[in-house]
Image (cartoon, grey):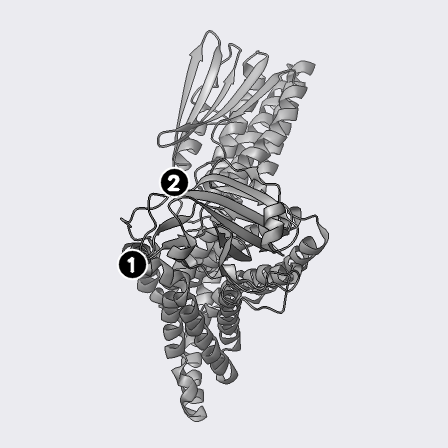
Amino acid sequence: MSASRLEAWPGRLIAAVIVVQAIFWLAIKPVLIDKPPTDFESITPVAISEAAVERPDYAALEAARFEPVEDFGAWHCCETGYRALRYHIELDEVPEQGLGLYPNINTDNLAIYVNGRFVAGEGDMTLPTIRYGALLRKIYHIQPANLHAGRNEIAFLLVRDGVPYFDYNRPIIGEYGQMTAQMRSAMFFAGEYKFMALAVIGLIALFALIVLLRSERKGESFWFFMLAASWTALSLYYVWIDRPMHGAAHMSFYFCVSLLLSLSWFCWADSWSAKPMVWPRRVAIAVFLMLAPTMVASLYFLSSGENFDRAGEILDYASIGFAIATIIRIVHGFIGSREDRYWEAAIVILLVTLLLLNAVTELTQSINMGYVGRSQPFLILGLAIAFFSRNVRLFRSQGQITALLEAQLDERTAELQLAHARQRKLVRQQAFDEERRRIMRDMHDGLGSNLMSMLLAARRGKAEPHTVAEGLQSVIDEMRLLIDSMDSVGESLSAALATFRARVEPRVREAGFAFDWMDETGGMLPAYGPRQVLQIFRILQEAVINALKHSEGSRITISVLPAADGIIITIADDGHGRLPAETGRGRGLGNMRSRAAQAGGTLSVRQSDTGLTVELALPGAHAGDEAGGHE
């Protein structure tokens, strides 16, 4: 990738993502997802109650022992089988066209009775061979002959054979003509639109299979086919009301297909990249092969309720992980490669973001807004058009394809080999030089200074035992600091602070000091490169060593506090010592301030009657690390 392209890709990708996100949230979402306002007068149910039912017939419903429900938004858990829900409505007069009823109940199938008369149902409700008709939401028509002025009873027989939850949400009841007119759009998306979406995605899966059979890039074509196929299977789940699978089997189908969809997004993103990597896909497939049987085992062997919740948690956490990994992989694919498919990447990032949002809402038991279900045909169609257009070369002659690929391959190979050789030589030499200078500087300032002081004291006959012991302790501290700085300390500030605390706390307590550690950032720490993290680590260690040697106190307190533009780290003691003078040598204040400047922060020292406080103020992020974390 040329230097100009390296500089351009972040802006172009971000611009494409912003445009696609804006189109979705400002155009597609208001039309497809947001519920249109309604102005018809709805009827409020009263005297809500629910009960367990032994059989799916009205006689069993009448014999059931109903318990009152305070309001809607209620649910019953945690067993499958039959239940009944009952409430009443008050009518001053019977509407000429009767009433419309949108039950808004989450169940597998249902039958509706009004004033003891059967008015609607979705076929077989006998376990274990039930129909799943309630998945297709619609407005039920209650004829005027089934109603009367005054109080009317509406009762539901419900059945579940997989999900152990019956959810009772507030129904929508109104005059039939007004209600159907006002909710026409909502009912279209709840019914016919699902079949249209299934047809569109099914055709995409079919074309993806054809491309797979003729494609040169088998990896990308295979995972695009798996993506379209799994999405087709998941769409089919919501409209397939006469399934041959029941109980844990049909729930296993749902969970495994949903997990396969998340896996397919990540594997497709990796194979789609200009520089595919095999090992991430292998890891992702291994995760899938581990989690899918775990979910199935949970559904079959755990108790009712716990089985569904456990499988759901596994799916939601895995979906979140796959979604984040997919976005990272797409962005990573643009780094250092000749990648210019910004619009495809933006569409994929939007789709994966919606899947991530769906998983988060499921995990937090929030309302699922339907972002994925309603928008998926348009977004995946756009992605499919881009995918198929790139594969039009499949229909060229084999000779044309071979000649074109050979010419491109020779050109790219020569460029890459030359650039790689230069970069590798430069990076290696820079790394060797920097590491050598750092080690020599630290040995000169620390170990050399202390050893020379002890040598001069011995020659002058002033090498008293306690002086030698103190000098040797300083040398040991220097060696510890040098050894600590020779490893990476951590790729993040959070890891560095954890390492620092683990290493310094025993040292402080061995020296007879009490040790207090306070971190009020909640883990929200700035992002720094390894060079800045190393400088912060060394400042902290130098400050603690100085407190141990010079404070003559009994307690050392370290605080990590959030600030308006970053964080503040303080190292305080309760003694009366001072830092060594600003001589520019050893562990002087000037040396610590120099390290703070290299980390992008500032260092200050406050002396009071209660002790000495070293304060390191760090900004929210540091842009001066041109190494980008490649120390």
Residue 182 in the figure: left or right of residue 272: left
> Between marks 2 and 1, how big is the CA–CA gap?
58 Å
From the top left corner, tell me how far across and down residue 588 is, in percent: 47, 24
Residue 249 falls in image quadrant: bottom right
Which residue is identified by label 2? 622
Task: Classify 10 Å Cα crowding around label 2: few (below 14), some (14-19), many (20 and above).
Answer: some
Q: In the image, 96: left or right of 315? A: left
In what element is the residue under mark 2? loop
Answer with left or right where residue 566 lies relative to residue 497: left
Q: Depth check: 236 or 261 in front?
A: 236
Q: Amino acid at mark 1?
A: Ala
**Which numbered circle lies on residue 309?**
none
The percent position of residue 286, horizontal first and vertical second, equals: 64, 61
Q: Residue at x 42, y 36 (%)?
A: 599
Q: Secondary structure at mark 1?
A: helix
Q: Residues within 10 Å of mark 1 (few under 14, many from 20)?
A: few
Q: Disc number at residue 181?
A: 1
